[in-house]
């Protein structure tokens, strides 16, 4: 796997990982001044995007999208400070199978085992 680091004039940096066939396997974009990062992961031995994740201060924050091999959206999640708030699961033909929304997450201590 090869690694390339590219600089940009907007204060961001890019890290690109390649597989043995010179396809992108993973790509990260990081904006240094805001501590934001966008990560793109590709299907194995393919140039097709598999998922896109957004981070803020090191935790998932924003939209995460997972794609089928044929480039259609399979799952869509919206994270706020690493917690999944809205989730959608779609079929290959675009039909929504599941949609859920979380409004509050509570943790009242250890679970009794």
Image: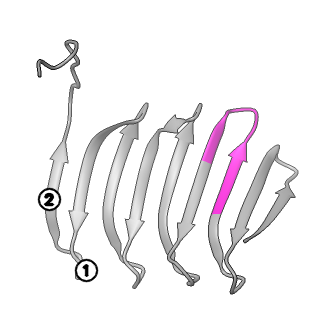
Residue drawn at x 66%, y 74% as measured from the top left: 24
Task: Name the residue at 57% across, 62% down.
Answer: 40
Residue found 17% across the figure and 73% down from its top: 95
Q: Is residue 57 left or right of residue 111?
A: right
Instruction: Find residue 65 and name its label.
Output: none
Please give the label number shown on residue 98. 2
Q: Is residue 28 above or below residue 69?
A: above
Residue farthest to the front?
113
Location of residue 46 in the rendering, given as x and y in whole percent from the top left corner: 56, 84
As drawn, 25 above or below 69:
above
Residue 15: image x %, image y %?
Answer: 74, 58
Q: Residue furthest top?
A: 109
Q: Tell me the quadrant of the picture where the N terminus can be found.
A: bottom right
Q: Which residue is found at the position 72% from the left and 83% from the top?
A: 22
Q: Magenta stretch?
A: 27-37
Mark 2, other Cα within 10 Å: few <14 / some 14–19 / many ≥20: few
Q: Which residue is mark 1?
A: 92
Q: Where is residue 65 shown, x and y percent of the image?
A: 41, 60
């Amino acid at each position: 796997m090869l690694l390339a680091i590219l600089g940009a004039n907007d204060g961001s940096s890019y890290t690109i990982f390649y597989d043995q066939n010179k396809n992108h396997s993973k790509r990260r974009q990081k904006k240094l001044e805001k501590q934001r990062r966008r990560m793109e992961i590709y299907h194995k031995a393919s140039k097709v995007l598999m998922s896109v994740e957004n981070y803020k201060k090191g935790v998932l924050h924003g939209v995460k999208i997972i794609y089928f091999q044929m480039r259609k959206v399979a799952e869509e999640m919206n994270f706020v400070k690493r917690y999944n708030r809205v989730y959608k699961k779609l079929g290959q033909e675009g039909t929504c199978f599941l949609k859920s929304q979380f409004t509050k997450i509570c943790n009242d201590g250890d679970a009794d085992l």
